[in-house]
Amino acid sequence: MIGTFVVLAMFFIVDIFFIGRKPHVPSTRECVTHIGFFVVAALLFGGLLWLVAGSRPAIEFYSGWLTEYSLSIDNLFVFVIIMANFAVPKTLQKYVLSIGITVALLLRGLFILAGAALITRFTWVFFIFGAFLLVTAARMVFGSNDDEEYKENGLIRMLRKVMKISDDYDGEHLRTTHHGQRYFTPMLVVFLAIGTTDVLFAFDSIPAIFGLTKDPFIVFTSNVFALLGLQQLFFLLGALLDKLVYLPIGLAVVLAFIGIKLILEAIHENTLPFINGGHAIDAAPEVPTWLSLGVIVVSIGTAAIASLIHMRSVEASK
């Protein structure tokens, strides 16, 4: 665990203080190389888990990583809107994403610790997590698209009221001087907008991954590997995001499946006095981890292939 955290921390340090200090728009080759590197790293990490701890933790990690990675792609829709809303220069967008994602990861870590403490003491919380995921899945399929407009959260609105924030960027600096007065640049607000908005998405993804594993270490590493390479994915898929028309349906199937799995697990380990007198219900089936991984791969893969076919048919009809 210590070795894992050291290596992952090095990834973020190199990205922020070395690669990120050179403002540029990543080329397609750079994006593909970085994404490939982090995907291979995740696969190798799962393999190491398999060797050290057995097949179950490894399959739980792969399931969690694929789920978080798929859900993080959905986050990119909002990231695109945030970048446009704050008029972030293209050469600074990679650096903004690096810092914003790091902030998001730290906040997610606190969220994961809180979630782990809850499910350890109160197994009935799975009823809430499961119902929440089912509602989220229904909203993805039948609800309106909330990604069409970005709305600043309360923290950002409060900052604007209490701090002097300039209208213009000054490179990567958080502070700048105008007419002898010191101002914060919009960069600070963008960092917090990316980080805190990602945490709002974590209200969907964290309960989902706790439906796949209860190990906080696997939950956290799944999130880290899903967020690594997300900025390159932002530049690579930026123009294609609106063409992945069936991705929400694939994600909805995954969330609905995990939601049902959570509810079944809560029933199987029931402690609520008004259900079966507070006793566990052994008849509730336990969903094996390999089945979860299979549902995730098939659902996301089918959605991606269907989206590509739809995109090609639309282009062919023009």
Image (spheres, grey):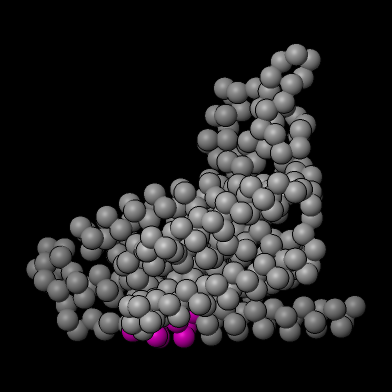
Give above or below for 9 relative to 222.
Answer: above
Is 197 situated above or below 171? below
Where is residue 190 shown, x and y percent of the image?
A: 65, 41
> Percent position (x, y) of residue 29?
78, 69
Position of 29 with respect to 283 (left or right) is: right
Q: Quadrant of residue 33?
A: bottom right
Q: Most prominent secondary structure in the magenta stretch?
A: helix
What residue appears at the point 79 percent right and 45 percent down from the top-left corner?
89
Residue 63 is one of the magenta-drawn residues: no
Q: Quadrant of the C terminus?
A: bottom right
Q: Using the image as rendered, state which of residue 139 and residue 14 is in the foreground.
A: 14
- Residue name at image x 55 percent, y 72 percent: 41
Q: Look at the image and tell me whether residue 10 can be seen.
A: yes
How many dots with numbers?
0
x, y percent for residue 119: 26, 60
Extreme residue toward the right, this view: 318
Q: Is residue 22 left or right of residue 42?
A: right
Residue 239 figure quarter: bottom right
| In the image, residue 290 lies in the stretch drawn in magenta | yes
183 horizontally vs 66: left or right: right
Question: What residue appears at the point 58 percent right and 41 percent down from the top-left corner?
Answer: 192
Q: Which residues are magenta?
A: 288-296
Q: Is residue 312 above or below residue 31?
A: below
Residue 90 versus residue 291 in the image, above or below: above
Residue 288: image x %, image y %? 33, 84
Find residue 206 and report its image quarter.
bottom left
Which of 66/6 is in front?
Answer: 6
| Left or right: 252, with 233 as reference point | left
**Residue 74 can be seen, yes or no:** no
Q: The N terminus is located in which quarter?
A: bottom left
